[in-house]
Amino acid sequence: MSQKRHNQNRTAIVYFGPTRQDYLDLVQADDHHHAYLEYIQCPLQAQLTSDKHKPDCTDFSRYTVHSQRERRVKGWQGEIETLPICRVKCCDCKAVFTVLPSFIPRYRRQDTDCLGKLLEMNLGMGLTQRETATI
């Protein structure tokens, strides 16, 4: 019988500025991600505590960009945008973490603006979850 997979919460959510362009400027810069890594060091140290790293890790302060993948996000008016999402690797224990910008919630395909407006409709207008999902 196969072992049950134990997922770990290895996601950090970082505020990159008031606009998506601020995030894209850092991620897509031509400096081999130096500005991006410098920007996320402090938030990662605060969020990625020792329990998120592997047990033998001793240095939580050094990361490299491990990979970058595209994520499709739906906006309030139905527009779909493809954004790069970086994954970073701890230089000590080699654990890989996903770094999400603050406008993309975990496990969702809508941006936070869209989710906020749907929640307002659900709570403020008395719509059911099914009616909100239809919208």
Image (cartoon, rainbow, N blue to C red):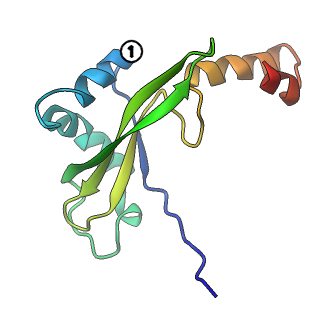
Q: Secondary structure at mark 1?
A: loop
In percent of width and height, residue 76 lies at 62, 15
Quarter of the figure that contains the N terminus:
bottom right
Q: Nearer the viewer, residue 120 or 34?
A: 34
Vertical relation: 126 (above or below) 12: above
- Which quadrant of the structure image shows residue 17? top left
In percent of width and height, residue 15 lies at 38, 29
Vertical relation: 135 (above or below) 16: above
Q: Amino acid at mark 1?
A: Thr
Which residue shows up at 68% across the image and 16% down it?
117
Which residue shows up at 32% across the image and 63% down it?
95
Which residue shows up at 62% across the image and 20% down it?
114
- Which quadrant of the structure image shows residue 39? top left
Which residue shows up at 46% across the image and 35% down it?
71
For the image, the number of numbered tags is: 1
Which residue occupies the extreme bottom position in the image? 1
In percent of width and height, residue 19 lies at 38, 15
Report whether 123 appears left or right of 68: right
Q: Nearer the viewer, residue 120 or 100?
A: 100
Which residue occupies the extreme left position in the image? 31
For disc 1, the marked residue is 19
Quarter of the figure that contains the C terminus:
top right
- How many neighbours does mark 1 have within 10 angstroms: few (below 14), some (14-19), or many (20 or more)? few
Vertical relation: 112 (above or below) 76: below
Q: Nearer the viewer, residue 4 or 72?
A: 72
In percent of width and height, residue 66 lies at 26, 51
